[in-house]
Image (cartoon, rainbow, N blue to C red):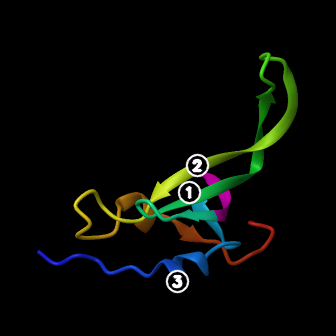
Amino acid sequence: MTRVDINLAQLRNMIGLRVRHGDLLCEIIEILDDGPTLVLKDIRHAIIQSNKFGDATRRVPETHTVPVLSTDHAGLHPAFRALELVDDPAGD
């Protein structure tokens, strides 16, 4: 069985790109070495963040994680392959 050789430097070059993750418009904001995993920020929707007392304090972008490799590291994860690059900066 062959393993996918993915370069973390190449993944880090993806930071700042806008992608469609399902029906969400997201921006890649971070690459986690463990996995590796992409961290996506939902550009259009925000969630309410609460403080340590549980009080709603502000709206923040929701984040999502997408694994790059399949569980056996033999190929790309289906969620990663399903990401669509968005050419239009406005996302339309």
> Of label 2 and label 3, which has the lower sequence position?
3
Contact? badges 2 and 1 (CB < 8 Å): yes
Label 3: which secondary element: helix
Q: Residue under circle 3? A: 10
**Residue 88 image offset from top left, x and y in percent:** 74, 75
Q: Is residue 57 shown left or right of residue 23?
A: right
Q: Is residue 27 magenta?
A: yes
Rendered position, 12 above or below 19: below
Label 1: which secondary element: strand
Q: Is residue 85 shown left or right of residue 50?
A: left
**Residue 43 image offset from top left, x and y in percent:** 75, 54
Residue closest to the far right: 57
Residue flagged by tag 2: what amino acid is it? Answer: His
Q: Which residues are magenta?
A: 21-29
Quarter of the picture holding the N terminus: bottom left
Circle 2 or circle 3, nearest the eye: 3
Residue visible at 78% across and 31% down in the picture = 49
Q: Residue under circle 1? A: 21
**Residue 85 image offset from top left, x and y in percent:** 59, 73
Q: Is residue 48 magenta?
A: no
Marks 2 and 3 sit apart, C-alpha to C-alpha, by: 20 Å
Q: Is residue 54 shown left or right of residue 58?
A: left
> Of label 1 and label 3, which has the lower sequence position?
3
Residue visible at 30% across and 61% down in the picture = 70
Residue flagged by tag 1: what amino acid is it? Answer: His
Q: Residue under circle 2? A: 64
Decide if residue 82 is in sight here: no
Q: Nearer the viewer, residue 35 or 59?
A: 35
Residue flagged by tag 3: what amino acid is it? Answer: Gln
Badge 2: few (under 14), some or many (20 or more) residues near its Cα, within 10 Å? few
